Image: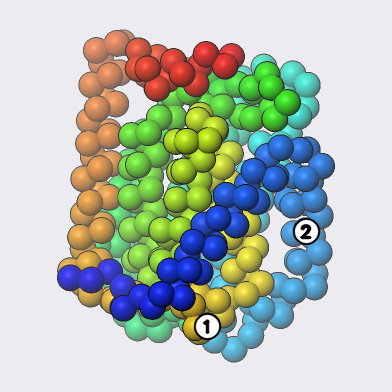
Amino acid sequence: MSLFEPIPFHSWVAFCAVLGALILLNEISRRSMWAGIGCFIVLPLVLTFTVWPHTTTAEGSSVGTWFHWAKVYSVLAGCIGFMAIRYIPGAAQKKWVLMFPPAILAINIAEAVVRDFQCYSFNGLVDGVMITGGSWNIMNGVAGILNILTICGWAGIFISRDKFKDMLWPDMLWFWIIAYDLWNFAYVYNCVGDHAFYAGAALLLSCTIPAFFMRRGAWLQHRAHTLAFWMMFVMCFPSFVDTSRFAVKASADPAALWCVSAIALAANVALAIYQIHRIRSARRHPLKDELYEHLPAYQHVASAR
């Protein structure tokens, strides 16, 4: 079983370049309000009226579907909303404002779940992408629903007191992030398989690495920024992942499709079981309380309050 066709050395170089560029752009955009405005408001406005109308309607384009348009604007809305929470004085003190991060996260996951279920009946070239539909789409759709249901602790979101004003979420710990990564990689592999080398592996690593080693607790902020940059890039240059010399094609092996979805489903089932156990044993309410304050990983992030 192989996930991809043979990967040449220059594609591995491109993988590292994409990964490094996304991490760097995330660092630039999170360190300054004006950099964020330029990256997530000014730049998309320019691209919307000058570049994307041409690249998304070109013959054979793989980024002209409703999903790609919905994804790029929903993730940009997330970036802008997070900036408002970070930079508007007192915004993070209002509980109704703190509902925005989990809501936009759930909407983005739900978009992908809908697409996974939709791809169940596809077999062949669809919207410029080769799709092999099957039971794996249903499995991974269920994993995505579980991933939404296990979002918790949003009431504990706060803004760091340093000059970067990062949006930190102590309850969003490594086990939820890993379950999300496995689900999201499986989604990309199932529905946009020929993009999975970059839009799956490299993109997910670009927000997971900073969340684990650079700015812990800010995974959702990292994810929104890196996804926005990637979506804007691929909407401008769809040939990079489709027909360029750097493109890496998925194997379309049913065994590989089934395996990645089964792993994602198992991880999210395990996450849900652990969360239910924690809710029952600690008598916590997942929509009101933080669940994991007993864990050192939580305490490390919360100490910045």
Residue 244, disc: 1
Q: From what the image shows, is residue 154 above or below residue 78?
A: above
Q: CA distance from mark 2 to mark 1?
A: 25 Å
Label 2 neighbourhood size at 10 Å, few (<14), some (14-19), many (20+)? few
Q: Quadrant of the C terminus?
A: top right
Give me the residue at 33% from left, 42% from top.
Answer: 179
Residue ID at (28%, 41%): 268
| Viewer-closest of 256 and 144 | 256
Local SS, label 2: helix
Q: Answer with left or right where residue 3 lies relative to residue 161.
A: left
223 shown above or below 152: below
Residue 176: quarter of image = top left
Instruction: Give the label on residue 43, or none.
Output: 2
Query: Which callout, 2 or 1, points at the residue further toward the start of the chain?
Result: 2
Q: Looking at the picture, how far across and down is residue 262, in whole percent?
A: 21, 54
The amino acid marked with disc number 2 is Leu
**Residue 229 occupies quadrant:** bottom right
Asked if residue 24 can be seen in this view, the reply is yes
* Residue type at the position of mark 1: Ser
Q: In this picture, is 213 found above or below 10?
A: above
The residue under the point 34% across, 66% down is 190
Q: Is residue 280 left or right of residue 236?
A: left
Locate residue 285, reporting x and y percent. Answer: 39, 17
Report whether residue 75 is seen.
no
Image quadrant where one finds the N terminus: bottom left
